[in-house]
Amino acid sequence: MTYPILSHGKGLILGAIFLVLTLALYAGLQVQADQSATAHPTSSKENDEAHGELIYVPIYSSIYYENGKRTLELAATLAIHNIDPDHSITVTRADYFNSEGKLIKKYLEKPIILGPLQTTNIIINRTDTTGGTGANFLVDWNSKGLVASPLIEAVMANASSNLGIAFTSTGKVVRSIKTN
């Protein structure tokens, strides 16, 4: 006896299993990332307080597969989280660069003030492959006093053709800016 769903739907079943495993892996990585963000603050200062920083965030517009012969295009969300519960920060720069380090786009026309615990997002569409496999953002932020450094991360995802992939990258402080 043959079961039509198994003979005609093997790809669908395998795709569903892959999606479930990918989402489970992503959830595990997200929990690990959340714990490491708490254990290892973005700022280089022990108390995680700063007047401002320049932060580098890797963004993957596409990733290689099949031994580098093909790429999979990804949508990306740059998320800038003001994690300070009491103070605002000002984001003054969110510039997008391609794999060669050339500026693609300046996303901020004017500074954005993020209130306590507020988040802003910048979306890179899946069809926008101008960044390439090594794209990145440089984000500048500052504050009027000492505040907790924001959490700046990227979420890359593609959920097409019965497959799904999603992962995150976290920003790294390039330099701290101290004002008097």
Image (cartoon, rainbow, N blue to C red):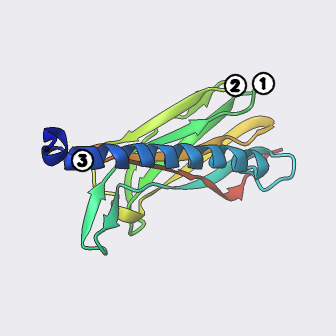
Task: Name the quarter where the C terminus is drawn.
Answer: top right
Where on the picture, by quarter, is residue 147?
Answer: top right
Q: Is residue 8 left or right of residue 167?
A: left
Left or right of 33, for residue 41: right
Q: Quadrant of residue 30?
A: top right
* Distance from the alpha carbon under mark 3 to that under mark 1: 38 Å
Where is residue 158? Give x, y as percent: 33, 46
- Give the numbered dot on residue 127: 3
Q: Residue at x 60, y 53 (%)?
A: 171
Q: Quadrant of the N terminus?
A: top left
Q: Percent x, y for residue 178?
A: 78, 50
Badge 2 element: loop
User: Where is residue 108 shown, x and y percent of the image?
Assistant: 46, 39
Percent from the top left, x then y, of residue 113? 60, 28
Q: Which residue is the extreme one toward the front?
A: 1
Q: Amino acid at mark 2?
A: Pro
The residue that disc 1 covers is 86
Q: At x 19% / y 45%, what residue is drawn?
A: 6
- Of discs 2 and 3, which sits in the foreground? 3
Depth check: give the residue in front, 33 or 82. Answer: 33
Q: Is residue 87 in view from this perspective?
A: yes
- Residue where numbered disc 2 is placed: 116
Q: Of 53 and 31, which appears nearest the observer?
A: 31
